[in-house]
Amino acid sequence: MSARSALKPNNLRDTIARAAQTLAGAGVASPEVDARLLAAHLIDVGPMQLIFTDPPAHFDDDYAALIARRAAREPLQHIIGTAPFGDIDLAVGPGVFIPRPETELLAEWAVRSLDDEPTPTVVDLGSGTGALAIAIARAKPGATVFAVERSADARRYLEENVARYASPIRIVAGDMTDPELLAELDGGVDLVVTNPPYVPETGDLDAEVYADPHEAVFSGADGMDAIRGLVPVAARLLRDGGALGIEHDDTTSDTVQDVVRASGVFGVPAVVNDLTGRARFVTASKLAR
């Protein structure tokens, strides 16, 4: 049964319920939530307002088209055009990594690590949409934040989001593993934070993952290529006592810690879990020399 033929209800609640059935049949992980969010997006109301809303003319046909796209496993965020991150909605689309909720924990850690720094210098390596850089800049108005992003496609979204939410951020077209990256900042950075590509090369993930740019998701056979390359860059940029925070795959915490230790310039790395209790982040401070 096609998405269009499945949607012949008498009211909005029935329409959404039938759409959820279509999405469930297509293997979408959260069919009810996605069906409601797409309806709310089309009507331009909050999801909680749907029960008080009469759908506009031509809603069924337009909604069926959106449901068909989602049933084809196009990411919800690409259809809507935004992804939530904390208390803001970031512009996203083909060509930029969609920020995930777990990265909000890294942003929270980053802001806490700067409690004693009213005017810190921060570098976000592999900034993508700017999620981490913007969260830090909004929480620390006195910060000087550099958002480093190699992809020209991703930088278009980064520029849009920075202009909307945190215009003082300095956008840098560069590679997070470049040995000469931001050499003018050497030894003067208070915090380096990164959500790099870290997934081991594989072909058995959810379909939506492959809608993200390959270079923003995968990082070699063990998922560690980018992290191995960026740790020396962070070590060079940071001042003594400066902090490093890395998001990583939930299977590579020990390996990430080993890479940080092997650099010889950081103290004992700490592990931070995500909301499901999985080791998801490694943090460390640069030793005094």
Image (cartoon, rainbow, N blue to C red):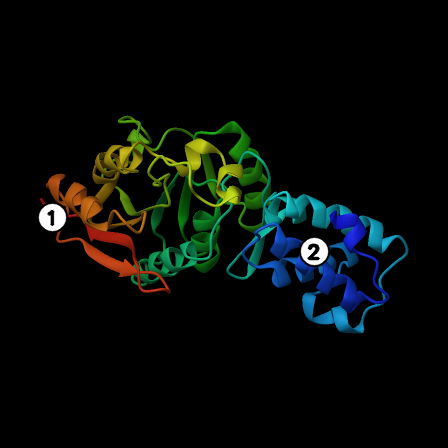
Residue 140 is drawn in which quadrant?
Answer: bottom left
Q: Secondary structure at mark 1?
A: loop
Q: Quadrant of the C terminus?
A: top left
Vertical position of residue 37 compared to residue 252: above or below: below
Kind of residue at badge 2? Leu
Q: Residue furthest bottom?
A: 52
Residue 17 is drawn in which quadrant?
Answer: bottom right
Label 2 Cα neighbours within 10 Å, binned few <14 / some 14-19 / many ≥20: many
Residue 184 location (% of width, % of height): 30, 31
- The answer, for residue 149, to whether it is visible in the render is no
Residue 287 location (% of width, % of height): 13, 48
Viewer-closest of 235 and 93: 93
Residue 172 is drawn in which quadrant?
Answer: top left
Kind of residue at badge 1? Ala
Can you tell which mark lies on residue 193?
Answer: none
Vertical position of residue 214 compared to residue 160: above or below: above
Q: Nearer the viewer, mark 2 or mark 1?
A: 2
Q: What residue appears at the point 19 percent right and 44 percent down from the top-left corner? A: 255
Q: Which residue is mark 2?
A: 38
Vertical position of residue 200 compared to residue 56: above or below: above
Viewer-closest of 160 and 246: 246
Label 1 Cα neighbours within 10 Å, binned few <14 / some 14-19 / many ≥20: few
Q: Which residue is mark 1?
A: 288
Q: Residue furthest front?
A: 1
Q: What residue appears at the point 78 percent right and 58 percent down from the top-left corner? A: 43
Q: What residue appears at the point 37 percent right and 29 percent down from the top-left corner? A: 175
Residue 285 location (% of width, % of height): 19, 52
Q: Secondary structure at mark 2?
A: helix
Vertical position of residue 154 compared to residue 138: above or below: above
